Amino acid sequence: MDVLVYGIDFNHKKGEFCQRTTLPYYFISYFRTDYVAEIASAPMRGKAGDYLILEPGHIIYHGPTTEADEGFRNDWMYIAGEDLAELLKRYPLPLNEPFHIDGSFYLSSAIERIDKEKDLSLDGWEDVCNMTVRQAVIDLYRAYKKQASASATDKLEGVRGAIMRNYKHAWTLEEMAQCCGYSQSYFCALYKSRYGLSPVNDLLNHRLEQAKRLMLYARTPINEIAEAVGFSSVYYFSKYFKKKEGVSPKDYRQSRLLSPALPAHGIS
């Protein structure tokens, strides 16, 4: 599989439609806002939270609704290669028609990883991009299969698992709540009732545990560790770390590092 071009939270201005195109590539999109599109030569209206996977040779044409004040936004990518066709046979998601899943991170987190790999172009980056697409498709398929019959508890467990697996992602409360299809206030209340703390603090604690593990087994600079586990800045990371652990990250590492002879290396 070869990811050709992509966009995250791509903004189409009011009245702006994408060019009506037929290409020999797969098109995958997550719509962050309501939209209109042409599917199988027929116009249709879609909702925020829809996914769309078009096979090669299908018309790609979509744009904002007539009442949209600011156009519409979506995440998208074009993919070439027969591997994707085989993958979609094993994990049969709806093709050439919109389907709804409560969660945008499946596509956006994959695009973020692919963008980083393409930018760095380290050894094996093509394989990492390939695996990232495969994982996104499998996660989408699992979410699609589970969603129809999921109870509120099942949804919450699934969303928490996704958040913790993708802890590096810059999660917002809006995005977390949208994964369950709940309002932010209801999602936060339900989450705290079940897990004893807010979703934000739960995520921060998980990031902190990952950082502690990295500090024990790697000679990586603190600022790189903070970025690697999803903190927005090393200052915020250090402040939160000291609040929870009672010592600075540097002092924590010095007191607990398993071996002073460990070689230096970075974080992938």
Image (spheres, rainbow, N blue to C red):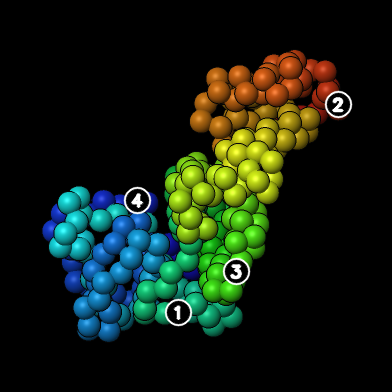
Camera-side mark, 2 or 3:
3
The CA span between labels 4 and 3 is 28 Å
Which residue shows up at 40% across the image and 62% down it?
49
Point out which mark residue 259 bears.
2
Residue beneath label 3, please? 150
SS at mark 3 in the image:
loop
What amino acid is found at the position of numbered circle 4 in the picture?
A: Asp
Front residue (pair 114, 195): 195
| Placement of 86 over or under 113, stated as above or below | below
- Mark closer to the chain start, 3 or 1: 1
Point out which mark residue 9 bears.
4
Camera-side mark, 3 or 1:
3
SS at mark 4 in the image:
strand
The CA span between labels 4 and 1 is 23 Å
- Mark closer to the chain start, 4 or 1: 4
| Placement of 223 over or under 136, stated as above or below | above
Residue 189 image point, x, y percent: 57, 45
What amino acid is found at the position of numbered circle 3 in the picture?
A: Ala
Quick check: can you spot residue 71? yes
Query: Counting other residues with Cα less than 10 Å from the Cα at mark 4, is it few (<14), some (14-19), or many (20 or more)?
Result: some
What amino acid is found at the position of numbered circle 1 in the picture?
A: Pro
Side of 40 where 116 appears, left or right:
right
SS at mark 1 in the image:
loop
Which residue shows up at 21% across the image and 78% down it?
43
Marks 2/4 in contact by CB < 8 Å: the verdict is: no
Camera-side mark, 2 or 4:
4
Side of 78 where 177 appears, left or right:
right
Location of residue 188 (image quadrant): top right
Residue 36 image point, x, y percent: 23, 69
The CA span between labels 1 and 2 is 52 Å
Residue beneath label 1, please? 94
